[in-house]
């Protein structure tokens, strides 16, 4: 696994800044955002680089054409936020809430989700490369026509996740929960699972265990 992490050497001297006060079309660099609630915020055409977000609430927000490069999110709540044409490059989510987020058609490159609640997340038609979901809840999420490369699931909860026209070939699911996963034979072909998980996929060949 070779996922590039945010370059923390640039985080030693960050300037404190209020997220709700940033100006339109402003590029934000070397900033620290902490203990703010900016629910329903709307951001368009921004770039955040070498920034850290700590205990930031941004529920039901709308972000369009926003780029995050070398950004760390700690204990943030982005539930039900709409991300449109956004990009996350070398980012890390730690103990965050992303439940109900729309990340469709976004770009995720070298991103780690650690101990994060990402249930009901929509990653359809997104480009997902070098991404780790570790100890993360992805229940009822959507991967439809998602372009994936080097994606890792470690102890993730994939219960009732929908994979459609998204190949899981070569992807190790053996440490994750896959009960009720919705997937086609073509999409699951070549995935790595354990013996018990095979029971959850028997419906694909139309058999029942008596």
Image (cartoon, grey):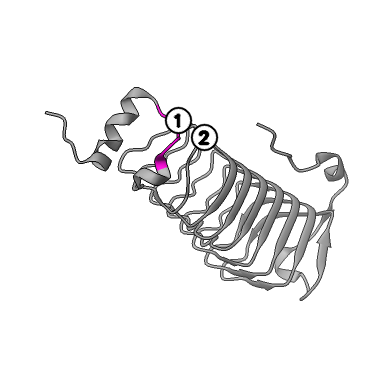
Q: Quadrant of the C terminus?
A: top left
Q: Which mark is residue 192?
A: 1
Taking the spot 44% from the left edge, 28% from the top edge, the residue there is: 174
Q: Residue furthest bottom?
A: 24
Taking the spot 57% from the left edge, 63% from the top edge, the residue there is: 105
Observer-nearest residue: 90 or 27? 90
Q: Is residue 70 placed above or below 188 in the rendered structure?
A: below
Observer-nearest residue: 20 or 6? 6
Taking the spot 47% from the left edge, 36% from the top edge, the residue there is: 156
159 left or right of 146? left
Q: Which residue is mark 2?
A: 170
Q: Residue furthest left?
A: 210
Q: Is residue 69 placed above or below 7 in the rendered structure?
A: below
Secondary structure under the numbered disc 1 in the rendered image:
loop
Residues at discs 2 and 1 in contact (Cβ within 8 Å): yes
State which tag comes first along the sequence, 2 or 1.
2
């Amino acid at each position: 696994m070779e996922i590039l992490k945010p370059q923390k050497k640039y985080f030693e001297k960050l300037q404190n800044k209020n997220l709700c006060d940033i100006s339109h079309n402003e590029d934000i660099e070397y900033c620290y955002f902490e203990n703010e609630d900016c629910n329903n915020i709307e951001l368009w055409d921004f770039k955040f680089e070498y920034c850290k977000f700590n205990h930031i609430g941004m529920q039901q927000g709308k972000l369009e054409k926003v780029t995050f490069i070398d950004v760390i999110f700690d204990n943030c709540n982005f539930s039900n936020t709409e991300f449109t044409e956004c990009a996350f490059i070398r980012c890390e989510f730690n103990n965050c809430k992303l439940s109900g987020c729309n990340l469709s058609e976004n770009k995720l490159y070298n991103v780690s989700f650690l101990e994060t609640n990402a249930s009901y997340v929509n990653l359809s038609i997104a480009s997902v490369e070098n991404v780790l979901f570790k100890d993360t809840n992805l229940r009822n999420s959507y991967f439809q026509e998602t372009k994936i490369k080097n994606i890792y699931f470690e102890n993730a909860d994939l219960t009732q996740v929908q994979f459609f026209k998204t190949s899981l070939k070569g992807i190790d699911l053996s440490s994750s929960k896959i009960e009720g996963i919705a997937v086609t034979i073509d999409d699951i072909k070549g995935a790595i699972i354990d013996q018990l998980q095979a029971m959850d996929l028997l419906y694909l060949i139309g058999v029942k265990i008596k």
